[in-house]
Image: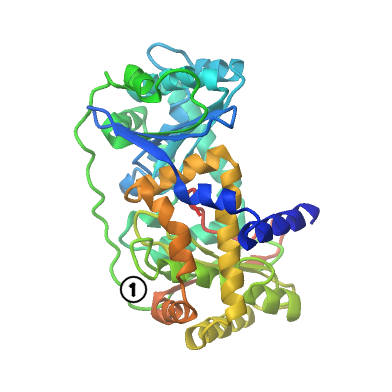
């Protein structure tokens, strides 16, 4: 609570003008960019006041690039990228980064896969050399693949199959999309993982892991010498490959409400309501972002104040919307139902608040509060070198790194009428997918309220 109060004070100060210098720097985003002859784009966000450097390699491949029967390939390939190359054996990558005092990891989303290291400035060459090596020389050994596949299967069991709320979220997403590959989970379906082979991963790696299907984000203190010259030294000789196949799946316009019901051992019922909405390419994206904040982001939101604080019909409730996806996704409301309350009753109350948002403009105070919340989140994340690089990378994924400069101006321009119109246009019955988890007798695993997993976000 003390930390939350401190963040609130910091956010208030920044947005009231005390942090004018930080805000000005946030809006400038002094990124330098260059593209190598092999198609690799390099983005450099220099910050010599920070004694660290972050290196991120973004591959334009995620679960949306997979095919039915081969789901989970992106995530499994991410695991295999830590298992050695033709020049460095298993675990050598991690050992070298750790000896240099750095940290590293990776993550996969529906749209992209990112590998990253954060080190002292003198570690930049090490990170570049290691990333270039595994971009070109990954060894996909059948034995190591079998071990990693089992790790992923266990990860799926723990995070999803044994977590009723996450399983509900997965089922809602799979029901909401019937043509677009967003319908399957990033981690993949269990039968697909079980049937996957090392050759499947090898073909996938050879198709998508190429300099012309990737870009590099470097942020922080680069040490001595030109960043671009050093990137050229490590990556410039890597050959470009044929462009990967385009994602052809397009979601048709929804024609009616869809529903899914799960019955699992759980302590309490859960409810997930997902609406098909546009992404960042739409003029409605920022009004929807504000709408989500008004409805269910934080304790001052409408749904929390009514359902949790006032009427005590839910133990937890929130709204999620991430406009920064390659293709349109969902705005979702998730709730954990209070004991003694039926999911149907809670759904009715949520529907009342949705209808209110469709028919009435939000108040000036609500609009200002929602904007402050989103703006504060955007600004405060820039204290982290990693998140600044992440913001640049995600903007580049969606059409060009300069998009990050548009976030604050577009957010501030949102009006109450635009928020209402977005709610009226998209929060409709025919765009809605409702999922309900009914507890069954047993020891129960409550889990946390379901929430749609997304990629990083530059807000």
Q: Which residue is mark 1?
A: 254
Seen at 39% across and 57% down, the residue is: 183
> Does dot 1 land on a helix, a strand or a loop?
loop
Instruction: Give the side of residue 415 with respect to residue 10, left or right.
Output: left
Specify whether residue 247 is in view.
yes
Specify whether residue 444 is in view.
no
| Residue 165 at x, y percent in the picture | 60, 59
4 vs 172: above or below = above
192 vs 259: above or below = above
Position of the N terminus, as image quadrant, is: bottom right
The image quarter in which residue 196 lies: top left
Residue 171 versus residue 252: which sits nearer the camera? 252
Q: How is the image coloured?
A: rainbow
Seen at 54% across and 30% down, the residue is: 48
Residue 167 versus residue 38: which sits nearer the camera? 38
Which residue occupies the extreme bottom position in the image?
A: 359
């Amino acid at each position: 609570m003390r930390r939350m109060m401190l963040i609130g004070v910091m956010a208030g100060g920044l947005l009231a003008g005390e942090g004018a210098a930080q805000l000005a720097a946030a809006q400038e985003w002094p990124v330098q960019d260059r593209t190598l002859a092999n198609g690799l784009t390099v983005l450099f966000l220099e910050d010599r006041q920070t004694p660290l450097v972050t290196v991120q390699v973004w591959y334009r491949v995620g679960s949306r690039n997979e095919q039915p029967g081969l789901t989970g390939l992106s995530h499994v390939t991410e695991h295999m990228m830590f298992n050695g190359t033709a020049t460095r054996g298993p675990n050598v990558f991690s050992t070298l980064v750790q000896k240099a005092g750095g940290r590293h990891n990776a993550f996969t989303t529906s749209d992209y896969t990112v590998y990253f290291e954060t080190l002292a400035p003198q570690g930049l060459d090490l990170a570049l050399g290691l990333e270039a090596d595994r971009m070109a020389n990954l060894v996909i050994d059948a034995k190591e693949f079998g071990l990693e596949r089992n790790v992923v299967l266990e990860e799926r069991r723990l995070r999803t199959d044994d977590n009723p709320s996450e399983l509900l979220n997965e089922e809602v997403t799979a029901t909401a999309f019937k043509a677009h590959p967003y319908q399957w989970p990033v981690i993949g379906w269990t039968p697909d993982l079980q049937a996957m082979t090392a050759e499947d991963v090898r073909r996938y790696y050879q198709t998508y892991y190429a300099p012309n299907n990737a870009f590099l984000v470097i942020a922080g203190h680069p040490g001595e010498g030109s960043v671009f010259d050093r990137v050229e030294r490590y990556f410039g000789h890597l050959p470009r490959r044929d462009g990967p196949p385009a994602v052809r799946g397009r979601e048709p316009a929804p024609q009616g409400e869809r529903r899914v019901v799960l019955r699992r051992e759980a302590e309490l019922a859960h409810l997930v309501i997902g609406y098909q909405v546009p992404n960042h390419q739409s003029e409605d994206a920022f009004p929807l972002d504000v709408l989500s904040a008004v409805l269910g982001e934080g304790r001052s939101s409408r749904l929390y104040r009514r359902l949790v604080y006032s009427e005590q019909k839910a133990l937890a409730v929130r709204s999620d919307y991430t406009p920064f996806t390659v293709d349109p996704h969902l705005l979702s409301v998730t709730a954990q139902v209070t004991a003694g309350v039926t999911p149907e009753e809670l759904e009715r109350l949520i529907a009342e608040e949705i209808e209110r948002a469709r028919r009435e403009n939000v108040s000036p105070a609500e609009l200002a509060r929602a904007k402050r919340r989103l703006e504060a989140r955007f600004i405060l994340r820039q204290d982290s070198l990693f998140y600044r690089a992440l913001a640049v990378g995600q903007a580049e994924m969606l059409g060009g790194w300069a998009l990050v400069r548009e976030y604050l101006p577009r957010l501030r321009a949102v009006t109450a009428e635009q928020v209402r119109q977005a709610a009226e246009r998209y929060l409709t019955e025919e765009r809605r997918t409702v999922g309900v988890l009914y507890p069954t007798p047993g020891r129960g695993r409550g889990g946390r309220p379901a929430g749609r997993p997304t990629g990083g976000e530059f807000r």
